[in-house]
Image (cartoon, coloured by chain):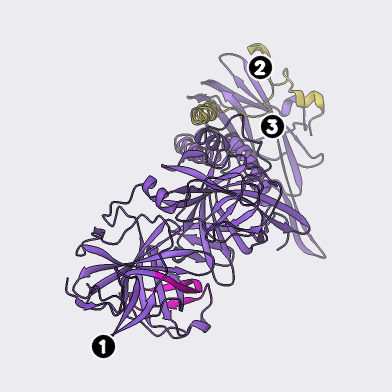
Chain colours: A purple, B yellow
């Protein structure tokens, strides 16, 4: 590495700036912060000792990331924004090249220097605001804060006196990108860093083993200053607040367990004991914290429980229990969320808005990686796409999104080896998968297929049936009286070749009169008789409303299930007294498809899909009754 | 399980539809009667139920 060598102005020890661009170096002999001012050095005095966290990283560690030259950790900066301390590591690639590796809340962000576009001043920034950062894309402001430069080790690429207040904004971009606008000690942006979340494995770094870090953090065995109860710290490098599991008192983990709020008893008991380990979503998580939060809507308090899970390599997750419905909740990248009016898109997945609320922290137990306090409130928006949920929480200076996956209660019980049975679920959970959805969709698919087959069969019958088997015009014998046996005639014989129905179409040129036929289809071979009647009437005229007409000159009758054979029709006509007997025609067709068969088949096919669809609707109605968008309720 | 049950149900419905359409079954069909040939061959000797009922 190219660099710069000098002597410490405080102790005279050798100072080596391994990066040519480093401007501040903490003397490894006396702990003084020494700044390069051109050819001169300025001593800012001794920096505070490093906050004894047990970060998985150490100065001098080497690694490699995504094809870039191998790097070495040459600097460590510790910052505190009032609710927690985090580490920024300086990665030197040799020569003048460097990048930041941010380590906070168990997560790592690799950040390289990018060209700074015109951006608003610090005072003009607001969370939720979108900024066009040029080539990296459009980013959402997720956090606007001021942090104190607590202490440092190694070298840093800027010249700022330890103890200074530094302004910054964290931004979230598309595709998991992350950016930081560095305002330094002023109000105008000085630098832009762009990168993404990475894992230590991706960085090719071998992390310090958990037990070693635990010892370094010195938090393995502590006692509550209020009740004396033993406190076991499970994430010493991350913990900001501890709520004593024995008395419930809230302690400041960063200030020798100073009592922030004294209580005499634990107000709530978690269903999953603190310290429990359970395998979920491919990792073994330790329950390190528990909180009861609530939202009050129209005077009714709706509480739920959140369990803070920790795994050193993956960081923090949440297990949320709302009315017996469990969800595994992970942080979501703000830049990957596209929020609309009543919808949100997250990684191409659409979520429907469920509810807006003000979520308040009521009780806490165990460890937390931020400075939690009872009464903390956030504005929350929940979206659902079962079995997933998407939640946004916003404070004045921070916006966070999280993505949850529904868990069956038995799955949680099994994962944490809990005794007994999980509490009964109440109602329908916001992201509870409907037990009817899959069956309903499958039934719809099969019913659609069945309907298509029914129509296919119908068209087959339509094409192959409808053959004319008899056609005749009948003249009533002269002098016959209406309805008398003398007026009756037998038709010519005809053959029916195939089994099926017979359609008998009768027509007569009646005008303002009627013709009634009492008929019978007679099988000449077997003697079977199917009786039918046909009524033909047609009237017309005009009145004050104009011309009118009713009735028709023909009528159609169907005979059911006619066997093949030789047939005749016996027809006994009746007509209006005083009028001449009308001549009438007959057209007989066999195997004429009937649409009522299709109708009944469709009704039968869609019966189950309709039942399942109704069950599904009832389930969804129950789900949404708990939301801001209850069905049947005007918005 | 549900899938098999529904497929079986669907095939049953399709079978019923095919059979009833093929056989040309009609709803509310009158009961089929039998008339001896001797009666049938005399147009005035056989009266339909319509005749006894009054017809139109």
Report the chain holding disc 1: A
Instruction: Label the magenta part by its dominant secondary structure.
Output: strand
Residue A108 colored magenta? no
Label 1 element class: loop
Residue on which the image places disc 3 = A477
Closest to the observer, A540 or A199: A199
Q: Chain of mark 3?
A: A
User: Left or right: where does residue B25 sit relative to residue A53?
Assistant: right
The Cα–Cα distance between marks 2 and 1, rounded to whole angstroms, is 129 Å
Q: Name above or below for residue A303 compared with residue A603.
A: below
Disc assigned to residue A38: 1
Residue under the image location 44 percent in, 43 percent down: A281
Q: Position of residue A71 (x, y in %)?
A: 23, 64
> Does the residue at mark 2 contact the one at mark 1 (Cβ under 8 Å)?
no
- Residue A454 in picture, x, y percent from top left: 50, 36
- Give x and y (percent) for residue A95: 18, 74
Q: Please give the label number shown on residue B40.
A: 2
Q: Which residue is pictured at 26% across the width and 71% down the height?
A: A98
The magenta stretch spans which residues?
A127-151
Whole-angstrom CA distance, mark 3 to mark 2, is 19 Å
Residue A184 found in image quarter: bottom left
Q: Secondary structure at mark 2?
A: helix
Q: Which is more foreground, mark 3 or mark 2?
A: 2
User: In front: mark 3 or mark 1?
Assistant: 1
Circle 2 chain: B
Q: Answer yes or no: do the residues labelled 3 and 1 have beta carbons within 8 Å? A: no
Residue A255 visible to an observer of this rendering: yes
């Amino acid at each position: 590495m190219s660099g710069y060598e000098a002597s410490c102005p405080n102790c005279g020890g050798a100072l080596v700036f391994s990066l040519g661009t480093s401007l501040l170096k903490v003397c490894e002999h006396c702990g003084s912060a020494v700044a390069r001012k051109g050819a001169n050095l300025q001593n800012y005095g001794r920096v505070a000792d490093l906050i004894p966290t047990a970060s998985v990283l150490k100065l001098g560690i080497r690694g490699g990331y995504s094809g870039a030259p191998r790097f070495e950790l040459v600097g460590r900066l510790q910052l505190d924004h009032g609710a927690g301390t985090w580490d920024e590591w300086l990665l030197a690639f040799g020569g003048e090249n460097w990048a930041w590796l941010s380590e906070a809340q168990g997560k790592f962000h690799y950040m390289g220097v990018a060209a700074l576009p015109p951006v608003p001043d610090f005072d003009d920034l607001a969370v939720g605001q979108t900024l066009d950062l040029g080539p990296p894309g459009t980013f959402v402001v997720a956090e606007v804060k001021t942090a104190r430069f607590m202490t440092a080790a190694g070298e840093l690429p800027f010249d700022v006196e330890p103890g200074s207040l530094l302004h910054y904004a964290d931004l979230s971009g598309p595709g998991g990108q992350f950016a930081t606008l560095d305002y330094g000690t002023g109000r105008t942006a000085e630098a832009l860093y762009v990168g993404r979340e990475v894992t230590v494995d991706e960085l090719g770094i071998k992390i310090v083993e958990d037990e070693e870090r635990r010892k370094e953090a010195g938090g393995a065995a502590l006692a509550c200053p209020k009740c004396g109860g033993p406190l076991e710290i499970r994430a010493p490098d991350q913990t900001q607040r501890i709520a004593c599991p024995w008395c419930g008192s809230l302690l400041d983990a960063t200030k020798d367990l100073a009592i922030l709020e004294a209580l005499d008893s634990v107000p709530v008991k978690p269903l999953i004991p603190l310290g429990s380990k359970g395998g979920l979503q491919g990792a073994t998580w330790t329950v390190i914290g528990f909180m009861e939060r609530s939202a009050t809507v129209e005077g009714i308090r709706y509480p739920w429980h959140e369990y803070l899970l920790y795994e050193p390599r993956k960081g923090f997750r949440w297990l949320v229990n709302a009315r017996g419905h469990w969800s595994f909740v992970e942080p979501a990248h703000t830049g990957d969320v596209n929020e609309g009016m009543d919808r949100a898109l997250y990684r191409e997945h659409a979520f429907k808005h469920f509810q807006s609320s003000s979520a308040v922290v009521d009780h806490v137990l165990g460890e937390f990686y931020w400075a939690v306090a009872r009464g903390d409130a956030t504005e929350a928006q929940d979206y659902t796409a079962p079995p997933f949920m998407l939640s946004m929480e916003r404070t004045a200076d921070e916006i966070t999104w999280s993505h949850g996956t529904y868990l069956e209660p038995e799955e949680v019980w099994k994962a944490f080896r809990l005794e007994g049975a999980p509490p009964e679920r109440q109602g329908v959970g916001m992201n509870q998968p409907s037990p009817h959805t899959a069956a309903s969709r499958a039934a719809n698919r099969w019913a659609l297929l069945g309907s298509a087959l029914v129509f296919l069969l119908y068209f087959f019958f339509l094409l192959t049936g409808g053959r004319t088997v008899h056609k005749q015009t009948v003249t009533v014998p002269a002098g016959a009286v209406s309805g008398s046996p003398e007026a009756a005639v037998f038709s010519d014989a005809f053959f029916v070749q195939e089994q099926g129905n017979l359609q008998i179409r009768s027509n007569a040129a009646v005008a303002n009169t009627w013709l009634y036929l009492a008929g019978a289809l007679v099988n000449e071979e077997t003697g079977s008789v199917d009786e039918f009647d046909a009524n033909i009437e047609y009237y017309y005229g005009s009145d004050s409303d104009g011309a009118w007409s009713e009735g028709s000159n023909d009528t159609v009758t169907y005979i059911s299930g006619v066997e093949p054979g030789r047939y005749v029709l016996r027809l006994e006509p009746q007509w209006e007294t005083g009028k001449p007997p009308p001549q009438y025609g007959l057209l007989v067709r066999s195997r004429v498809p009937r649409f009522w068969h299709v109708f009944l088949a469709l009704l039968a096919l869609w019966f189950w899909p309709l039942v399942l669809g109704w069950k599904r609707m009832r389930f969804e109605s129950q789900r949404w009754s708990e939301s801001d968008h209850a069905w049947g309720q005007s918005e | 399980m549900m899938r098999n049950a529904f497929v079986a149900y669907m095939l049953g419905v399709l079978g019923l539809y095919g059979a009833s359409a093929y056989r040309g079954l009609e709803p509310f069909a009158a009961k089929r009667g039998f008339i001896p040939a001797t009666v049938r061959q005399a147009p005035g000797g056989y009266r339909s139920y319509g005749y006894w009922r009054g017809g139109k």
